[in-house]
Every structure is written in C-alpha cells, then in structure tokens.
Amino acid sequence: MEDLQNSTLKFFSDQELCYADIVPPAQVRARIEVSVLNFLKILNASNPAISDLPLIQRKMSNSRVNHGLLTELSRVFLSHSVSTRSLMRPNAAKAFVRVWKVMEMCYQILLQEKRVTQRELFYKMLCDSPYLFPSQTHVNRTIQDLVALLRCSRYSLGIMASSRGLVAGRLILQEPGKEAVDCSLCGSSGFAISGDLNLLDNLVLNSDARYVMIVEKHAIFQRLTEDRFFHQIPSILITAKGYPDMATRFLLYRISRAFPDLPILALVDWNPAGLAILCTFKFGSVGMGLEAYRYACNVKWLGLRGHDLPLLPDQSFVPLKPKDLQIAQSLMSSGMLQDNYKEEVALMVQSGRRAEIEALYFHGYDYLGKYIAKRIVQSDYV
C-alpha cells in the first residue's frame, strides 16, 4: 500500500494534469483510499490539521482552447489555477463535507460493480444527508469536485450519463451478441441513445451516410425523420434536445472516429444559445470541468446563419433576452470562436433579435429539407 500511495500521490500535486481520464475501478478505489489515508495522516500528526482539497477551477477565465496542429479539431482544456474546499471557511465547509460523502458513496458503488445516474445518486444522498444535498445541483457540483480531485471521469466513478439523445438515419448499431438496430427504421422518434458509455463504446457501427447532422431541437429532428430526409441526403441525424449530455456527445464522437471523412454539420437556432450548443459539441464545455475536452468533434455550422435572415418573415423574429446577451458576452470572451462565428454573434447583438429554425416553415413544411439540401450541395457551412 505504501508503494501504491507514493505512486498515486502524484495526482494530487501535479497541477499540469488539467484533465480527467477514464481509469479502471481498482485504480479509482486506490485513489480514494490514498486520499483518505492522507487526510487521516495529517489529522493524526503532531500538529494536527484538516487539509484543504485542491481543485482545478471550473471557470471560463481558467480555460484555454487547444487548436490542433494537424487537424481542424480544437478542444477546451482547463488551465492550472486552483481553488480549494476547506472545512475552516464557513462558506465552504458544507462543500468540503459533500466531497467526502460522495466519495464514500462512489467507493461503495465501485465495490458493488454497479453504475448509477446522477439523478439516482441525488435521491440516495437526499435520503442519507438531506441537509447537505437539498437539490440535484449540489450533487452535480460535488461530482465535478470529485472528478477534479481524483482526476478521473464521472464514468470511472461509477456514475452513468443520463441521456436525452436520439439518433436516426443511415446508421446500423449492433451490440455484441444482440440483433442489429437499423436507425432508419425507428420511425420519427428515432433510436434512444443509452447512457451507458461502456455499451456505446462496444457498439459496432456501420453506415453508408455521407453527412452527420446535429439537430438542436427535438421537433425539428422529428420533422426531418418523418420526411425521411436521411434518404434524400444520405445522412445520420442526432439530437440531444438542446444542450448535449455526455452520452450523446460520446456517440457522436464514436461516429466521427468510425467514419472520419463524414462532415459533421449543425442545424441550430440563430441565437447565442444555439451557437453555444454547437460550441459544446465542437469544443467541449467548461461546465464539465476536467472532462471539458472529452469527445470534442470537428463540427461545422450549417444554419441558421446571418445570410439566411432574408428568407424569414419579419414577424418571426423575437427580441433578444438578457440571458441571450449574457451568453453572447460569454462566447465572445471565451477565446473559442473563429472570426466568422464572432461576426454572427456581433450581428445578433447589433440587431437585438433572434430567429428560430421553425421560421423556415413560412415557405411550407417541406421547405426545411430543401433548405438543408441546398446548403449541403453548395458546401455552405463554416
């Protein structure tokens, strides 16, 4: 155990490791054991103290974008700035205790070889310690604290993604030993993406598609699948019904690795939130902490974009809300956006209005597919 402790201690002190990796359950348990032993060692020293927990800050100001030298892929990483959870500071004491409580629960989950969703973990913690975990947000933040402390992914901790994602179109999924699923035959609802990353990792993928299409909205996804758009333009359609969850991002990443020549295009509303959703698929999300970089894909923006606005009736535009302006400011200061993306955000703010994909229905319900097909044929995406 001493040798293990000496070798594993590096993950606490090496602030260069600003990412979380997928590690085996035995190694995660070892890291938890080392953290407990260190805590007890300091507590039992001649000058006992309660050590702070050093965590990488999960803030936009502590992020940077790593641009690939040989590829177009860029990813968000967190830099080296550290924040702490301390029992000695009244405003941080509960957060300090929460980390140890969730660490204990994850250790038990790993021992039992189980996996739980964040929602399931919340209800367990709510029953055990309601004064510490009164809301789902407290559990979510504490999980990210634990990821930052142990430098391992949520999945490595036994926490499974809750997926909202759907996939449809020219993609065949086969789980080993089971019957293949043809996603073009799943109807307008598409095929539900599992939250089990291990299952997704073991899927055998086959496709004759020529494009992958990320669709921001569930209703637009349903329209395209009902119209069998993926036969008009051989494509794979995928949606997370808004901001993407980890499982949807992981399946998209697997598709991009299995079929590296397929362009990945995004269809989102013309507003700051739509671009933020695109950027989460493209770069990752600071909100995911040390897992921010994971599963980034080279996504291109198909629409809606500024030069599409003449296609839309004036009555379809909606004024920007204060939340839109906050997102726009965050995007512009993030360092992620390329120049033509910045120009789009500046146009949104200057015009003071936003437009939704559904406004294209002004030209008829079949116009959406024609619009996308024309943009694809003209390679009109950035």
Image: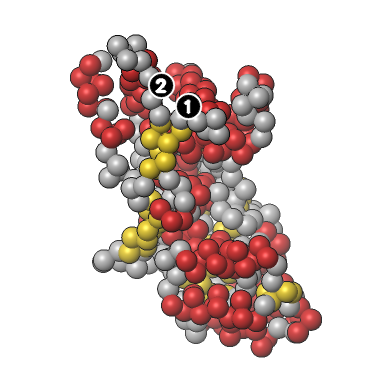
Q: Residue 333, position in %: x, y?
A: 47, 66
Residue under the image location 66 percent in, 62 percent down: 323
Residue under the image location 58 percent in, 63 percent down: 327
Image mark for residue 88: 1
Q: In this view, does 362 lie to the left or right of 246?
A: right
Say above or below: 261 vs 378: above
Label 2 close to label 1 by CB (< 8 Å): yes
As shown in the figure, which amino acid type bears the numbered disc 2?
Ile
Q: Residue 234, position in %: x, y?
A: 52, 69
Q: How far apart are marks 2 and 1 (CA)?
A: 8 Å
Seen as rendered, the residue at the extreme left is: 3
Colour pattern of the rendering: secondary structure
Q: Nearer the viewer, residue 107 or 239?
A: 107
Classify 10 Å Cα crowding around label 1: few (below 14), some (14-19), many (20 and above): few
Query: Residue 11 appears in which quarter of the rendering?
Result: top left
Q: Is mark 1 on a helix, strand or loop?
A: loop
Residue under the image location 28 percent in, 35 percent down: 13
Q: Residue 112, position in %: x, y?
A: 48, 18
Say above or below: 337 vs 255: below
Q: Which of marks 2 and 1 is nearer the N terminus?
A: 2
As shown in the figure, which amino acid type bears the numbered disc 1?
Met
The residue where tag 2 is placed is: 50
Seen as rendered, the residue at the extreme bottom is: 310
Q: Is residue 75 left or right of residue 342?
A: left
Residue under the image location 35 percent in, 30 percent down: 24
User: Which part of the image, by quadrant, shows the N terminus?
Assistant: top left
